[in-house]
Image (tube, rainbow, N blue to C red):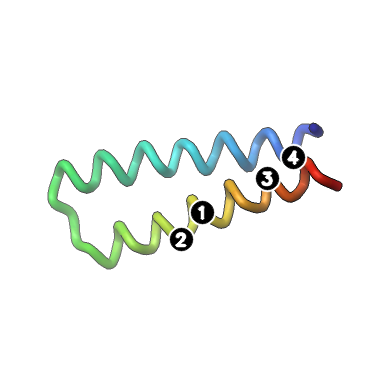
Amino acid sequence: MNGLSTVLIVVGLFFVGGIISFVKQKMPTSLITLMSVGAALCIVTGLLQMEV
């Protein structure tokens, strides 16, 4: 596990926290969807970087 994979996973989890906050604040669905895609990409990329 290198530094880049750790950073990507932490950023993805930060985005997940933001998504939860945005849902509670009833923000627009398009914004929540965009953040969800970004969070998923960060987490998946971080996990794939661990494999390499």
Which element type, helix, strand or loop, lies under badge 3? Answer: helix
Tell me, yes or no, whether the two marked residues, 3 and 4, touch with CB atoms within 8 Å: yes
The residue sitting at the right extreme is 52
Which element type, helix, strand or loop, lies under badge 1? Answer: helix
Residue type pointed to by label 4? Leu
Q: Residue at x 13, y 51 (%)?
A: 26
Tell me, yes or no, whether the two marked residues, 4 and 2, touch with CB atoms within 8 Å: no
Which element type, helix, strand or loop, lies under badge 4? Answer: helix
Mark whose residue sits in front, 3 or 4: 3
Tell me, yes or no, whether the two marked residues, 1 and 2, touch with CB atoms within 8 Å: yes
Q: Which residue is mark 1?
A: 40
Res 41 → quadrant:
bottom right
Q: Quadrant of the N terminus?
A: top right
Residue 45 percent coordinates (x, y): 67, 52
Which element type, helix, strand or loop, lies under badge 2? Answer: helix
**Sequence-wise, which precedes: disc 4 or disc 1?**
4
Residue 20 bears which disc, if any?
Answer: none
Residue type pointed to by label 3? Gly
Q: Which residue is mark 3?
A: 46
* Direction from residue 37 to residue 52 in the image, left or right: right
**Sequence-wise, which precedes: disc 4 or disc 2?**
4
Tell me, yes or no, whether the two marked residues, 1 and 3, touch with CB atoms within 8 Å: no
The residue sitting at the left extreme is 26
Q: Which residue is mark 2?
A: 37
Tell me, yes or no, whether the two marked residues, 4 and 1, touch with CB atoms within 8 Å: no
Q: Residue at x 14, y 44 (%)?
A: 25
Question: Alpha-carbon neighbours of circle 1 within 10 Å: few (<14), some, or many (≥20)?
Answer: some
From mark 2 to mark 3, how far is it between C-alphas?
14 Å
Q: Which residue is mark 4?
A: 4
